[in-house]
Image (cartoon, rainbow, N blue to C red):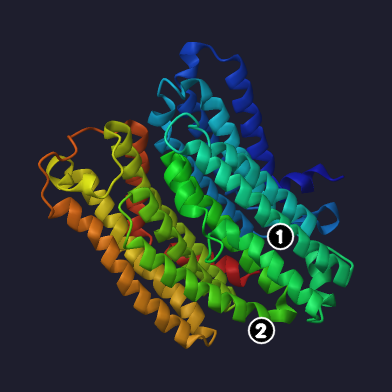
Amino acid sequence: MNYTNLFSCMQAEVTLVGVIVLLFLFDLFAGERARRRFSAVACGLLLVQLLVNILPHGEGELFGGMFRYEPMHGIVKSILTVGTLLVCLQADRWLRRDDTRHKQGEFYLLTLSTLLGMFFMIGAGNFLMFFLGLELASVPTACLVAFDKYRGHSAEAGAKYILCALFASGLMLYGISLLYGAVGTLYFDDVAQRLSGSPLEVMALVFFFAGLAFKISLVPFHLWTADTYEGAPTAVTAYLSVISKGAAAFVLLTVLVKVFAPMTAVWQTMLYVVTVLSITVANLFAIRQRNLKRFLAFSSISQAGYIMLSVIGGSAFGMTSLVFYVLVYLAANLTAFGVIASVEQHSGRVGLEDYNGFYRTNPRLTLAMTLALFSLAGIPPFAGFFSKFFVFAAAFRGGFHLLVFIALVNTVVSLYYYLLVVKAMYITPSDAPIAAFRSDRGTRISLVCCLAGVLLLGVVSAVYDGINLYAYGL
């Protein structure tokens, strides 16, 4: 084996494995004083891994085509790494609690293991490699969801997540087995050449899509989302809502376009229905929520529906729009979850009514939450407006004019429930608002970075142009 080619193609994976090993050794041998800097060590190593990953390197493939590297893969992996780094910064205060301090190592190792699985999913050129990456990303996530098993509903959330994940994995594996029985291979390129659109292949596509739709929280595969988001630790909820969803959405687009291209009409029809349901149902249920974590759970389902607008066209422009949307969504959603986590750690409150009069005591956090919600709603000039514009344009170019209209109508509905939170913070009075407090350093750093993304990603065109260059180069 050519080890130079191995490092070139798997640069992100090799360096991430190195970070995992170093953190494992640090957790094993570090003394009590050194362990107080666990977050700084983990974030520093992850930052080094990110800097190494963005170094330019050429395309290639390994293991007979089971794993491949393309320039767009590097961009997506870098975005996911940035999101993970921000989540780790926000989790610092929670991990310093008396009941979680001894589990800091487990949190970072589990989180980075899921990230490694997503990297393998993104780089897979074979359904077997893809499925192994999916399971590597899913199983540690269940442990993260149940991390606070003696608090709240964390254990219940973990049980619901792992049961639903197992069922979804079973459906997907059954679909892959049907596909193998129909075409006799698991390699993406070979499958695309042998597909004929037979009923068996259509069944394989349906089962495969159902399994991956679970990861993205698309309706009707979303039923686990609200309970899991509410019961999981807030840092884990933030990770699930952005990193896991972004990786699965990119892989879905890649597989549908490259593997199931001969069956485009079939999966576009299926995706059309699922997209409409996801946006509409999630928006209607979000209006009724009084717990902010459940509120953002249904918001994330709706956002997943908007992401599907970039997938349904099956074009390079759609891929650019998807990656840009994930980047903007990462900045806005992690801002919202950063504020919620900070408030929860200081007051234990997560209800919508608890934020009444929040502006009077914590104006800076209120402003951060407001900007995040405006971006999620797609209000100009924030980055969310531009990301929504591009996914709408991608679907419109594909000829899905009615779908774009339905999405636009739902955008108005989403603006209403996002403004409910803004109204509570600025207008609704409270006799006992959340007391003034100062967030920890890690949360402040992450919020500053996220807010910079919310304000600048839309107006700094070089970001979109750079992603677009890689997409059309595929």
Q: Position of residue 268 (x, y in %)?
A: 61, 79
Q: Residue at x 66, y 56 (%)?
A: 168
Labels 2 and 1: the sequence-earlier one: 1
Q: Residue at x 38, y 67 (%)?
A: 283
Q: Which residue is mark 1?
A: 171
Q: Which residue is mark 2?
A: 265
Tell me: 166 left or right of 39: right
Tell me: 422 left or right of 339: left
Q: Secondary structure at mark 1?
A: helix
- Where residue 470 sits, quadrant-wise, is bottom right
258 above or below 336?
below
| Quadrant of the image containing the C terminus | bottom right
Nearer-the-camera pick, 11 or 166: 166
Nearer-the-camera pick, 400 or 138: 138
Q: Residues within 10 Å of mark 1 (few under 14, many from 20)?
A: many
Label 2 and label 1: CA atoms lie apart by 22 Å
Nearer-the-camera pick, 215 or 34: 215
Which residue sits furthest right?
Answer: 184
Tag 2: residue type? Answer: Ala
Q: Position of residue 334 (x, y in %)?
A: 40, 49
Tag 1: residue type? Answer: Leu
